[in-house]
Amino acid sequence: MNTCPNHLHGKQKIQYIWDYYKLPIVICLIFLYIISYTVHGYFTKKETLLYTGLVNVSASSQLTDELSCGFLDSLNTNTSKTELKLYTGLYLTDNPDDSNHEYTYASRIKTVASIADERLDVVLMNKEAFDAFSQNGYLCNIEELLLKLDSETMAECKPYITDNIVILEDNADEIMPDDSQPYQAVTDEFPMGLLVSQKGLFKRAGFDGDVYLGVIKNSPRMDMAVEYIKYLIL
């Protein structure tokens, strides 16, 4: 049988090419896939303007949309190129008897990792979560941050600025093996939160319950966090 490619036709020629050039063809296809995937990712990747989290706060789909897409619309940004990342469903509690203990652990790990990676800028939370974020030293001095606002907007925010306590050091590790020792801690108190549920977007939405806003102190997007506060409070 003549196997010269010049004498083969149709399926025989295709089979001949596949049999002899299978490896180069596969390598070329993989290479083309990687190139197309990279190019597609480059042109479709969105810039994240802000990372926000709802902690112990359950919002309706409409309110969630206003907390994310509504903010982008207020900035008149191109939503095909920019986004606001909103983490939902985060739940934190120190109650050891809570039925969602395992879910709380997963939320805590995600929160700590997001802060370490600078992928959490603004937190909207209930009082329990506000206390936890404050005590762990995650939040910045919000009163100092709000000095970037104009005087009129600052006056609107000032009644809702809320102090909380940060634990600078304690003996928690020392008393774990010996609970007869009294707990001792060195603390500081300063403005860490803004009670946003009493005014602006949350109030107009008829949200039931207190919601505190805090800004993570290692956030590289402080200016955008200030814009977000203006959007929520006015």
Image: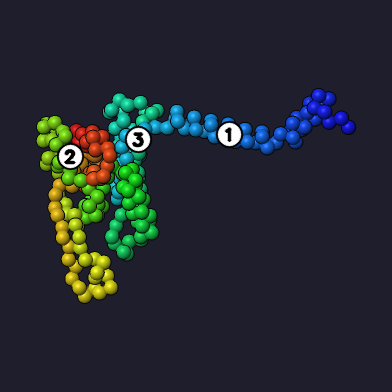
Could you tell me the amino acid type at mark 3?
Answer: Thr
* Spot occupied by residue 94 in the image (x, y as percentages of width and height): 28, 60
Quarter containing the N terminus: top right
Q: Nearer the viewer, residue 145 or 80?
A: 145
Element class at badge 1: helix
Residue 155 showing in the rendered view? yes
Q: Along the horizontal axis of the image, is 41 left or right of 165?
A: right
What residue did someone put label 1 on? 31
Could you tell me the amino acid type at mark 1?
Answer: Phe
Quarter containing the C terminus: top left
What residue did someone put label 3 on? 48
**Circle 1 residues within 10 Å: few <14, some 14–19, many ≥20:** few
Tell me which numbered mark, 3 or 2, is placed earlier along the sequence.
Answer: 3
Q: Along the horizontal axis of the image, is 200 left or right of 38?
A: left
Residue 200 showing in the rendered view? no
Tell me which numbered mark, 2 or 1, is placed earlier along the sequence.
Answer: 1
Q: Which mark is residue 145?
A: 2
Q: Do callouts 3 and 2 mark residues in contact (Cβ within 8 Å)?
A: no
Element class at badge 3: strand
* Spot occupied by residue 168 in the image (x, y as percentages of width and height): 19, 57
* Spot occupied by residue 24 in the image (x, y as percentages of width and height): 66, 34
Could you tell me the amino acid type at mark 2?
Answer: Leu
The quarter of the picture where residue 201 lies is top left
